Image: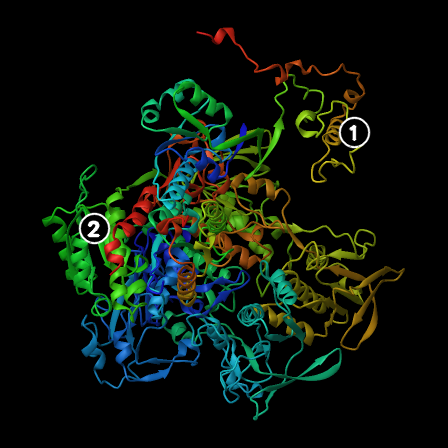
Amino acid sequence: MSEHAGVKTKAVGAVLVVGGGIAGMQAASDLAESGFLVYMITFDDSLGGRMAKLDKTFPTNECSMCLLGPKMTGSLNQVNIKLLTRAKLSNLLGQPGRFTAVVERYPRYVDESRCTGCGQCAEVCPVKVADEFNGGLSQRRAIYKQFPQAVPNKFAIDKENCIGCMKCVKVCTAKAIDHRQQPEILELSVGAVILAPGFDSFDASLLGEYGMGYYPNVVSNIQFERMLSSTGPTGGRIYRPSDRKIPRRVAFIQCVGSRDYRNKYGAEYCSAVCCMASVKEAVIAKEHHPEMEVTIFYLDMRAHGKNFDRYVNRALAQGIKLQRCLISSVKEDPATGNLNVSYCEQGEVYTADFDMVVLGAGVRPPGSAGQLARSAGIELNRYGFARTGEFNPVETTRPGVFAAGGFIGPRDIPETVVNGSAAAAAAAELLSAARGSMEQVVRYPREKDLQNRQPRVGVFVCCCGSNIAGVVDVPAVVKYASSLPAVVNAWQFTYSCAQESLQRVKEIIEQYQLNRVVVAACSVRTHLPLFRETLKQAGLNQYYLEMANIRDQCSWVHRDYPRRATAKAKDLVAMAVGKVCRNQPLHLEPVPVEQKALVVGAGIAGMTASLSLADQGYGVYLVERRPYLGGLLNRLYLPQRGENPRDLLRQKIEAVINHPNITVYKEAELTHLSGRIGSFHSTLQVGEKTVHLHHGVVITATGNCEAPVRGYLYGKDNRVITRLEMEKYLGENKNIDRLNTVVFIQCVESRQQGREYCSRTCCVQTVRQALALKELNPGVNVYVLYRDVRTYGFMERDYRLAREKGVIFINYDLDKPPVLRSGSEAVDVDVYDPACREELQLAAELVVLATAAVPSEGVEKLAGLLKIPVNEDGFLVETHAKLAPLDVPAPGVFICGAAHSPQSIGEAMAQGRGAAARAATILSKAHLLAGGAVARVLPEKCAACLTCVRVCPYGVPRIGTDNVAEISAVQCQGCGTCAGACPNRAITLEHYRSEQLTEKVRALFNGEVASSG
Amino acid sequence: MGDFKPQIIAFCCYYCAYAAADVAGSLRLQYAPEVRVIEIPCSGRVDPVVILKAFEEGADGVYVAGCLEGDCHFLKGNIRARKRVEYIQKILSELGIEPERLAMYNLSGAQGDRFAEIADEFTARIKKLGPSPVKVGDSL
Amino acid sequence: MIVAQPKPVKEVADYIKECAKVLVVGCSGCTSVCLAGGETEAEILATALRILRKKQGRPLETLVTTITRQCDPEFVAGIAEKVSQVDAVVSLGCGVGVQFLAEHYPDKWVLPALNTVFAGGTVQAGLWEERCGLCGDCVLHLTGGICPITRCAKSIQNGPCGGSQNGKCEINPDTPCAWHLIYEKLSALGRLDLMLEYRPAKDWSKERSGGPRLVQRKDAEL
C-alpha cells in the first residue's frame, strides 16, 4: 500500500481495458461496479471474444451464448463502461496511476448511434466473402454483423472487400452508413491498464501431416464447434464439407500444435483446454447425431478441472471412444473423401477409416501480442504470451499494467473470469484513492406522483424503417391501439429509437399528460433500458413502460403472412396496454452497507483476498481456525517456475499482520451469521471469548487438505510417504544423495469410485519433485507411475525436462494399480507397463504417494451457516461454473481458493484477488439499491408454511420473528419462483404480479376483433 | 376446421426462451403466427391460476418455455415450472380439457431454430386437437 | 397440523350443479400450509369450476375469499356479506372449517372441497405423513417419541407383532415397523428398561368413540 502512496494523491480513477472477451468484460464490470470509469476497447466489431464462437461449455454443456448475452448487454448498458469497437492501443505513456493511453480507432463506416441493426444493408450487399467467425465455413457480406447476438447490435463494413457500390447507403433509411469515416486517434487519461486480448488458435494447415487445408473433411475444432452451434454455418448439423453428408465415424486428434517441439510450428506447452473441448464436442455431436461413432486420439486426458473427470466418464459411458495414441498422419481416400488413420494400441498397429477428422488445434498467443506488448511496454514470455508471475498471474512486467485471460497463457473460461476479476482488484488496489473521482452518476428530473390517477396511455408504434412496416400494417396497428380503453392516442415512428423520436416521446408525454407508455417495436432485451431512460427523463417511473415486440417476434418471423402478422401485432399491443394499466411505480430504496469484509480462512487465498481489500481501503476481519496463518502453504518448499513459496509465505504473513486495515483472529471459528448482503452480523468463538462482528460481505477461503491414505503400505512402512511429506524432505535436503531409486505413484485413491475427481496439483508437484531429486542426486532412478500426466499449460515444460533428465514415466491402468511389498532393503513395487507389455518390479527406497486433495474438515457446517451449496466431493458450489466462479447463490457471499476446487498457489491467489474484486462491487457503495421487480410478502396473508423458504434457489426467504416470511429486497434475485409456489398468494413478484399477467391474457381475448384480422 | 386459427399463449422466460425468440427473429426463421409470447423473468414465476384463467378466457393452447434443465439462469426455477405444469395438466384432464393443450418446453437462449420449431410443433398439435372445449362447449 | 387433500373438481362441481353463484372460501391455517386450501388453491378451484360450467354452457359466477382460520367463529363471521350474495359456499378448510361455516350460516348450503386426512406434518417438501392419532392419552414419553397408535398399522401397545420383518411392517414393506423404531430409539437412548415395564392397558375411553370430546379452560372463558 505504501509503495503507491505517492501515486495515489493524483491517481486517475479510470482504467483502460483492452479486449472485449469474457476476461475484459469481467474486469470492466467489476471496476465499473465499484466506482471506476472504464474505457473498454476491442479490435472486434462486437463484444464476446472467443466465447461467442462456442456452442456449449464444458463440463455442464451450458449454452455459451446464453451465458454471454446478458454479460454483453450488461457491459454495453453500464454507464461507466465506455465501449470503443475496432480500436487498439498504440502507445502507453506516463506512470502507474497516471497513464496516457493512445488509442487508434478504425472506422466501422456505420454510425453506431443511427444503425438499428435491421440488416437490410447486408441483404442488398453484392459482395460475399468467407466468414472468419464461422471458420470460413459460410459466407458473409462486406457489410455485416459478426454474429446474430452481436453487442452492440450494429453493422460494420469490411472495407477491404467493399466494392463501393453504395447499395447499402441507398437502402439504409436510418442514414447510418458513412463510407467517408476516417480513423481517429484518442488520448485517454487512465490510472491503470488491463490487457485481455484473448488468444488465437493454431493454424493446423501449417502441419502438413494432418491434411488440414487440402483434405476437405479434415476440420479444426473451432470449425466443428461452429457447426454445432444453432446459429452457425450449418444450423447445428454436422456435415462433411466435401459432400454435406452427416459423418458416421469421426476422429478427434489431440495436441495438434501443442506439446510438440519437433518443428518450428509446434509449441512446447499444453493448451490446457483442448481435451475437454474435444470431449464436449464429441458429446454434443452425438446428441445431435446419436448414430455417430466418435474416437478421440489423445496423449493424456487432461481433465484437471472441477467436475471434469466425471464429464469424461459420462462421455465414455455414452460411447465416446478414447484411444491413447499420438497420430502421426492422416491419409485421404480421394474416391470417398474418407480419412485413414494409423494408431497403436497395446503395442500393435491398427488402421481405421473415418468420415471426418477434427483437429484439436492448440492455443496460440493473440496475433496482436507483439504489437500490444510494444505499445503497452510489457515483456512477453518465451512462448509469446504476456510475462506474468507464477504467484501473481495478473501482474505484467510494467507496474500499473495488468493482464488477464488467454493472453497470460492457455486457460479455461472460469480461470479467465477469475483473472478478469483479479486484474480489476489489482487496478483498484493501485487506484483506491481515486475511486469515484471519474465515476459518472446520471441525474433525472423529479418523478411525478401519479399514484391513484386514471391510466392515460400513449402507444408508440415503430416502423423500424421497413423492418416492421414492410410486413405489418403499421397505420392499422396505430388506429387499433388508439381505440383501446385507457389509450389517449397512438403515434407512428419510422425509428422509435432514434434520438429525435425519443425527444418527441418526452414532449408527447408532457403535452398529453401521459402516465403510461407502450412502445411497440423490438425486444425488451435490447431496448428496454433505452426507453426506460426516456421515461425517467420525462419524470415518469420507469416501470410505467411496456414493450410489444412486433419486430424480432413478429414481422421478421411471419414475412409470408402480413395480414396475420398485423393481427398478431395488434394483439401484442393490446396485451401490453392491458398490462401497463396495472403497472405500479417501483422505487429502489437505499440500504446501508457496512464497508468491511469477513474473510474465513487465512491460507494463501484468504490472505490475498484480505490484503487486496485492505489495500483498497476496506476493513477486513480475517478468521483462522488454526493457531498460525498460511494454511497449506506452510507445507510447500520447492520453487515453482522460479518463485519460492517460503518467501511468499513470509511476505504475506508479514503484510497481513502489519496491515492497519486487517484484524486477525486465530484459533477462531465462525459460529453464527445473520443479516443480508451489505450488513451481516456474525459471531466468532475465539478461544474462550465470543466476538461479534458487523460487515458487508463474507469471503470463504477454507482451502483443502491431504486426504488420509488407507492403502499402499502408508503408515505401515515408513519408506512410503505422501507428496507433502516429500516436499518437506526435499526442502530440508537430508540424505537425498543416498537414494538409488524413488517411485512416485499418482492418483492415489483418486479418480476412482468414491472420489471421482482429479486433485489437479499433484502431477505438476510430482514432476517438480522428480526434477529436484535429479538435481540433488543426478544418479537417482526416478519412476513416475501415472494414469494421465496432467502438467497443463506451461507446466508441460517441467514434464519435458523431467523426461530429458531421465525420469521414467510408466502408465498404469485403474484396473491394474501398482502393488507394494515391504522388503528388507527396499519397498518392492510391481507395476504392469503397457508399452513393453511386461510386469516390472521396482525396488524403491522411497515411495511417494500423490495423495488426493479433499476439502477442509468441517466445511459442510460452515457452508450450512453461509447457505453455500456443497457438491458430492465436498467442495463449495459456485453460482455458475463458468461465468460466476467466485460467487455463490447467497448474495454477498463469495468463495475462493481450494475450497472451490483443488488449485495451485498462483490460481488460489488469483481467486483470492478476484473474490476481493467481487466483494468490492458491494463494499465500494455506501448504500445498495434494493427493490424494483423483486418478491414482496403480504404479511397478513402469510401462513408461515415455509414453501418459499424451501423453493427459493438462493435461500433468501426466512420466517422472521413475526412468524411470517421475510424476503429481503436487497437479496432477492427476482425470479418469482416463490410467488409461483406460495399457496396463499402471500408473495407477489413486483412488475409480474398475477393480476398483471392475467390482464395481459385477458387483453388478448378482449381484442378478439384484432385476432380475426 | 381448416381455417381454425388457434389462440396460443407462450409464457417465455427472459433469459432463454424469450432470447431464443429474438434469435429466431434475427435469423429470420419463419414460424406459425398464432403464438403470443408473454415474457416472465423465469419460468419458475409461472402461475397456475394465470394459466387456468388463460384457458377460461378461451386459449386453445398454452405453453411455458424455460431454460434447459440444469441451465436455468435462476438455478432451478425451470424445474419448479415443469412440476407446476404437470400439476395443472392433471387439473385440465379433470376438466375434460386435453392435457396436451398445456406443455413445458426447455431451450437455450441461442436456439432460435428450436424456438421456431416449438412454435410450429405446438401450433400443429393444437390445430389437430381443434378449438378448446371451453369455447366449443361439451357436445352433450 | 391437519392435513387435507383436494377432492376431484368434478365431485365439487356436482355438489353445486344447481347453483349460479358460489363463494369459494380458502383457509390460511393448516390447509394452506399443506398446500390444499390456501388462496391459490381456492383460485384454482374457482377457475376450474367456472371452466367446467362454461363448457356446459351454464356459466357459474364465483367469489373467492380466504380467511385466517375457518375454525374460529370470529373469522367465519367476517365474510357474512359475501355469503349473503351466493347460492352456496365451498370451503377449502378441513372438516372443522366446513362445519363452522355451516353452523354459522345455517340457511346456506356449505360444501367441502377437501378430504381431511390426518394430523401430521411435512416430512419433506411435498410429502406429509400422519403422526398423531388424537387418542387423548399420549404415550410418547414411553416410546422414545414414536407414536404406536398412528405409526403401527394395528396401533398395538406392546409390539412388535409377529409381522415385523427386517424392521418393516407386514402391511406395507415400505413402512417401517413402529415398534422396531421404538426399540432402536430406546436402545440408542439407553432406555430399553421402558420396554420391560409392565403397563396397564391403555385408557381408550379418552379416544373419540365416546362422541365428540370437549376441552375446557375455565380461565379462558369470558
Above or below residue B8? Residue A802 is below
- Given residues A1000 and A299, the one toward you in this image is A1000
Q: Residues within 10 Å of mark 1 (few under 14, many from 20)?
A: some
The answer to whether residue A915 is seen in the rendering is yes
Relative vertical location of residue A880 with respect to residue C90 in this rendering, above or below: below
Residues at marks 2 and 1, CA–CA distance in whole angstroms: 73 Å
**A578 or C117: nearer the viewer:** C117
Residue at 44 percent of width and 56 percent of height:
A421
Q: Which of the two discs, 2 and 1, sits closer to the camera?
A: 1
Tag 2–tag 1 contact (CB < 8 Å): no
Q: Position of residue A231 (x, y in %)?
A: 41, 71
| Residue toward you, A197 or A22 | A22
Q: Is residue A598 above or below residue A471?
A: above
Residue A361, percent across and down? 53, 77
| Within-10-Å neighbours for mark 2: few <14, some 14–19, many 20+ | many
Would residue A746 appear left or right of B66 to someone viewing this image? Answer: right
> Which sits in the foreground, A1012 or A542?
A1012
Quarter of the picture holding the C terminus of chain A: bottom left
Residue C16 lies left or right of residue C144; in this view the side is left
Question: In the rendered image, is residue A384 in sight?
Answer: no
Three-letter amino acid code at the position of disc 2: Val
- Direction front: furthest residue: B140
Write down the chain letter for disc 2: A
Asked which quadrant contains residue A89, the reply is bottom left
Question: Residue B106 in the image: x percent, y percent?
Answer: 46, 58
Q: Secondary structure at mark 1?
A: loop
Mark 2: which secondary structure? Answer: strand
Q: Which mark is residue C161?
A: 1
The mark found on residue A517 in the picture is: 2
Q: Residue furthest right?
A: A824
